[in-house]
Image (cartoon, rainbow, N blue to C red):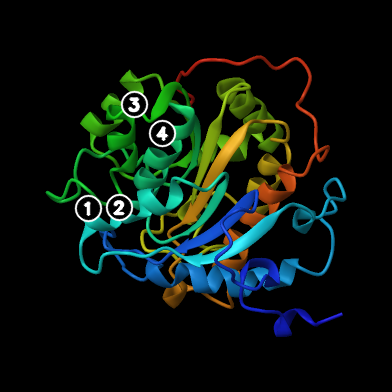
Amino acid sequence: MTPTFALPPGFLGLSRVPVRTADFCIAGISFDLGTTNRAGARDGPHAVRRASRMLADGANPAGWVDPLSLSVADIGDFDLALGDVAASLELIEHQAAPLPHLLAIGGDHTVTLALLRALSRRVGPVGLLHFDAHADTWPDNFGQPLAHGSPFFHALNEGLVDPRRMIQVGIRSPVPRDVHDWTAARGIGVISAEQVHLDGPAAVAERIRSVLGGLPAYLSFDIDAIDPGQAPGTGTPEVGGLFTWQVMAILRRLGGLSFAGMDVVEVAPAYDVSEITALAAATILWQYLSLQVPGSALPSPGLQPGGGGIINKG
C-alpha cells in the first residue's frame, strides 16, 4: 500500500483528471479577490488536497463507509478571470453548471454565490446549511457589492435559496444592526456558536434536519466557523467558535438529507499551524462524501420538514 505522503496530489490521493462525468466532482477555486481582511485563500485548494491524504488509508469508522467507493473525481481547479470579480463568478458558474454533484474547495466565500447560481438552474431554490462566524448577508463590503461578506445577501435576493429552509451555525462576529435585522426578517434560522456549546451537537443536528427537511439542500462551510485556536489559517478569525469535534458530530448526524452540493471556503494556509486548518477542511469534505454513500446513515426518526425562525439565545 502506498504511504499517504507519497499519494498523488489530488483530494484523498486521487490523480487529477479532467473527467466531469463522475457522480461526485471535486474542484478547487483559487480565488480570494473578495477578502476584506487577510488575503491568501487562493492557496486553500492546494493545502486542503495535501492534508486530505491523511484520510485516504481506511474507511470512515462512523458507519464503516469508504467515500472512495463512490464515483468521485478530482477535476482540478476552475479557470478564473485574473483581477475581475464579476467575470470570475461568471466563469465559476459556467464551469459548475454541468457537474452533477460538486464539492468545491475555495477560495473565499464570494465563490458560493456563483455555485448557488449554477445549482439553482438545475434544481430551483435550495435549502442552505451555512456554517460560519459571519452572517455574510451584508449588502456590500466597504462599498464593493461582490465580496465574501455578501454572497447570501445576493443569493436570497436572487431567489437562489429558500429562506425558510436556511440555517446558519456558528455565527458570532460583530455585525451592523441593520444587517442582523434584514437577515432575521427573512426567517432564517441562526444558531450561535455559544448555543452550539450549550445545547450540544445532537440538538443542533436535529434543528438542522427540521429546517432542511427532505428537499434539495446545499452545505456551505466557512472554516472560520471553527474557533481560531483549532483553525487559525483563515482571513477573518473570530474567537469563541466551534470545536472540530462538534463539527464532525453534527455532520455525522445529517445522513439521509438531500444535499445537492457543498463547498469549504476561506482556508488561508499562510496563517495555518501544522496544517490543522487544512486538515479540518479536508475532513469536512471527507465526512460529507461519507454521507453520500448509500446506506451510510438513516434520518433520525420523528423529524419533519420545518420552517425558519431564529435561534440565537447566546
Task: Tell me the crowding category of disc 2: few under 14, some 14 to 19, or many 20 or more residues within 10 angstroms, Cα based.
Answer: many
240 versus 36 height, above or below: above
Q: What whole-number distance in Å separates the C-alpha atoms at marks 1 and 3? A: 19 Å
Residue 67, quarter of picture: bottom right
Q: What whole-number distance in Å separates the C-alpha atoms at marks 2 and 3? A: 17 Å
Q: What whole-number distance in Å separates the C-alpha atoms at marks 1 and 4? A: 18 Å
**Pick the front one: 183 or 59:** 59
Q: What whole-number distance in Å separates the C-alpha atoms at marks 4 and 3? A: 11 Å
> What residue sits 32% from the left and 64% below the top?
80
Decide which of tag 2 and tag 3 comes sooner along the chain: 2
Tag of residue 159: 3
Name the front one of labels 4 and 2. 4
**In the displayed structure, does residue 48 sit left or right of residue 141?**
right
> What residue sits 66% from the left and 14% below the top?
304
| Amino acid carrying mark 1 in the image | Ala
Name the front one of labels 4 and 3. 4
Q: Which residue is mark 4?
A: 121
| Amino acid carrying mark 3 in the image | Gly
In the image, residue 13 lies at what x, y percent?
Answer: 69, 72
In the image, residue 224 lies at what x, y percent?
Answer: 46, 55
| Amino acid carrying mark 2 in the image | Leu
Q: Which residue is mark 2?
A: 89
Task: Tell me the crowding category of disc 3: few under 14, some 14 to 19, or many 20 or more residues within 10 angstroms, Cα based.
Answer: some
Q: Are marks 2 and 1 in contact (CB under 8 Å)?
A: yes
